[in-house]
Image (cartoon, helix red, strand yellow):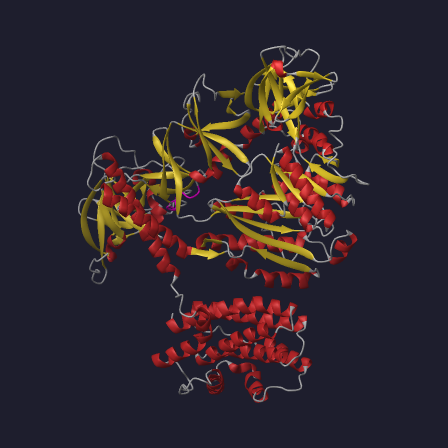
Amino acid sequence: MSTETAVSNLKEYVTATIGGQLFGLPIQQVQDVFMPERLTRVPLAPPEIAGVLNLRGRIVTLIDMRDRLGLQQRVGEGVVMAVGVESGGESYGLLIDSIGEVLKLDDAGREPNPINLDPRLARVSAGIHRLEGQLLMLIDVDRVLDLSVKSIAA
Amino acid sequence: MDDLLREFVTETNESLDVVDVELVRFEQDPNNAKILDNIFRLVHTIKGTCGFLNLPRLEALAHAAETLMGKFRDGVSATNEAVTLVLATIDRIKQILESLERAQREPDGTDADLIGELERMVLKLGSKQPVAEEPQYAVGTLTPQVLDRPLRLGEVSLDELERAFRETPVDPPPAKPAKPAPAEAAAAKDAAKDDDAAKSSGQSIRVTVDTLEHLMTMVSELVLTRNQLLEIVRRHEDSEFKTPLQRLSNVTAELQEGVMKTRMQPIGNAWQKFPRIVRDLSNELGKQIDLEMQGAETELDRQVLDLIKDPLTHMVRNSADHGLETTEQRRAAGKPPHGRIRLSAYHEGGYIIIQVADDGRGLDTARIKAKAIAQGLVSEADLAKMSEAQIHKFIFAPGFSTAAKVTSVSGRGVGMDVVRTNIDQIGGTIDVKSVAGVGLSFIIKIPLTLAIVAALIVEAGGERFAIPQLSVIELVRARLGSEHRIERIKDTPVLRLRDKLLPLARLSDLLGGKAAGDVESGFIVVTQVGSQIFGIVVDKVFHTEEIVVKPMSSKLRHIAMFSGNTILGDGSVIMIIDPNGAAQALGKSVTSQIDAANTAHAAPDATAGQSTSLLLFRAGSTQLKAVPLSLITRLEEIDARKIELSNGRHMVQYRGHLMPLITLNEGVNIKGEGAQSLLVFSDGNRSMALVVDEIVDIVEDRLDIQVASGNAGVIGSAIIKGQATEIIDVGHFLPLAFADWFRRKDQPHRAKPRSVLLIDDSPFFRDMLTPVLQAAGYAVTAAGSAQEALALLNDGRTFDAAITDTEMPDMDGFEFATAVRADTRTADLPIIALSSVVSAEAVERGRRVGFHDYVAKFDRQGLIAALKEQTDVGRAA
């Protein structure tokens, strides 16, 4: 995480598209971006866990972000990417559709979640940035990984 | 944290652990000046260092404790009260150390209470010759406000330093040593350490656990990489890498072993606190308790050690609190007043076996029953069918505690279920054996290490999994029409394996797969978890591989079927099956159906599953007859013309003796010519032979006498290889050959025959052995179970020796021996173990529990010889 720390309130986000929606992940939390290969399905695992794989000798647990965010399941096509994050000494990969550029955003421009935001999105959202032409939802990685934060949706 | 402080905390904690143990020893052996010196020295070192590091609370406490112990050294006898007080002080010091470690400074608060008590105790013990400087010093520490009084603090630590480092010419540090200069720090360390240094004399170094953990991780990676390379080379047959890779592979294996070794610690480390705990408990509960520890040097992985510390402590507490009776109760029950708790540990295969045993009242079966019903764990009807051992297992059920009252010692709602969960987590098993009034023992079996295990790689539902080799008993290939058939009881697939029914489950079904067709063929991984044996059906079996266990992601840890995951040589991740989880998933319903079926199939006795080599023959009729092969000395075919008739009996010259021939029944005609088949039975230098028509076969089968026989010479009928077969009673024929077979000349006449207690759960073997033993001149009392035998012994029956089967339900021979040894009245009873498996391990285990001899079942001569030796020794003594 050798990123230059943002000046004043500027924060850097790695952007990713999942199901057509743009999301932003705090760059400090992103370890790497990789293409998941040799994914091993884990029987009996919660549905949002896509499986595990070996990434340079580490076992990475992959989270299916579409499932986690309550978005539509992917239909066959397209290359899947994964954003590597770390939490509690463990490695995770968040499955996304495609990776975008890194954006510097002023924290002042962050707005709270709209009250009518889909609860499945709201539970992992850290706020919204209005960009030109589209909205960027900030993802709270810790909450994504806290699979117990789910009951709200049910 | 400051390095110096960290070092101090570590060392002091270690010293305190020693002090703990030593004090308890000292209390029992108050005249041992050496122990006292050792304690004194340790406490003194702590005190000195505290002063130097400006830790006034610790210093004042250590000082007060030291003063009191000074009294002991002056010859005042150490009262229980005084020792308790010193122990309490040590506990307080530990508490302070803990927060010191966290906050890097002493916690606020005062120890005036303890110090006051210590000082009162000093006065009470009232020595004539107090150490010269102590009164003055005591004034200094007496003030409860030692804290936050820099001036006094300064004085105190200066004083202490001078005393502590008298011999070392060090300049006194400034009054407020906020941060000691490095040179001084080094000096202090040297001074504090020199005692330890003398002990270990530089042969060992201190390495942080983190360093070792990191090493272990790196070695694990190395193992993985090596596996990957091996996988690659396997694909390229004549690769030039082969030789160097072989070398790398060996080096890696050695490195792995070496690093594993650094992680090994003696289990005694986990036991260290027990003498103190038991001492405190015996005071608190008013019981006299002896603690025995065997095998403290047995080593296991420190990670495992950490995880079993608490469960063990819990069990020791339980034993002291609930298990052992009060002194009065024990006297009333005719037991020695001192209760005994015994901890033992030893290695067996890749496991360490730990036993926690007491000679207390045992489990209260009635209360467990009541509670199990009250908690809805089982229905009354089911309960009635359960054996005592099965009922005892309920204590491991969640939330189960039989303690009628909650005491401060145990019974805080944390029961054996927590212990079991902890042990399950590390892939271990726990079992309980209890005999009412005699004692209780827990047997824990845990793997030596968790990091690298041998595992069988299998495939199910198109995915690969690893099954830890340690729980795999064997692999069976099941096919339609083959020897091992998969059958069904209702809807449950079972495997008939050597006449035992094993419940089966497809691995893919256990893993929540769709109902994947029929279990008709496939590989069956016969797996054992505790006493439960079952088969896991997989599609393919690959090979065994050393795998590096990586913990499951915290998001997946709740899945009981997996104990971890690993990376295979080809780089893919696979799940490691947890046999415990599989056993649970297999479900109670299945196992109980099997149990029912097994009992229905088998005769009520417990010979089920025990297979015996039997000789099948025909004599006098076409019906098959059988006799245990091991009773037969030889099979012979003789020329019928050599058979002579003498005094109306058939004889044959055999190895320089005349051997009588006995026909099994009237139907057997001794041939006039041709070859005559004989079964020769020998005892000592005499032999007899049974004349038979035809020797058919030798088979391995379960001896399960279904119909008892009224005919002399026939024990009964059993189904062997699908045919009704008569089992011959050899004991009946022996005296027919020699009328005096039962009264042998070479046995001196005795006023009273020696008495033998024969314990075997199988009526067949009891019946088989009783005449044999009687023939050898012993009075035999047979018992069908260890409990029955113990009851006989408890009734005051005395025997010259006991012969016990090792494998019995409920209580096996090992436990029987342990129980016998535990009772002073029977401690000297020679016990001979009979076992169908005589492995070096079993013999060793037998020796430990106190078997005098270990004889293979059916080794009749060996048994008689052993018996003779033991009873003769007994008489001579």
Q: Position of residue B248 (x, y in %)?
A: 27, 47
Residue B794 is left or right of residue B506, and the answer is right
> On screen, B818 above or below B661?
below
Q: Residue B326 in magenta?
A: no
Residue B706 or residue B594, whichever sits in front? B706
Q: Which residues are magenta?
A: B550-558
> On screen, B691 above or below B210?
above
Residue B392 or residue A140, whichever sits in front? B392
Q: Position of residue B220 (x, y in %)?
A: 33, 49
Residue B228 visible (yes or no): yes
Residue B260 or residue B854, whichever sits in front? B854
Q: Residue B552 in magenta?
A: yes
Residue B846 or residue B67, whichever sits in front? B846
Identify the image quadrant of residue B789: top right
Q: Main secondary structure of the magenta part?
A: loop
Task: Pick the quarter of the image with the N terminus of chain B.
Answer: bottom left
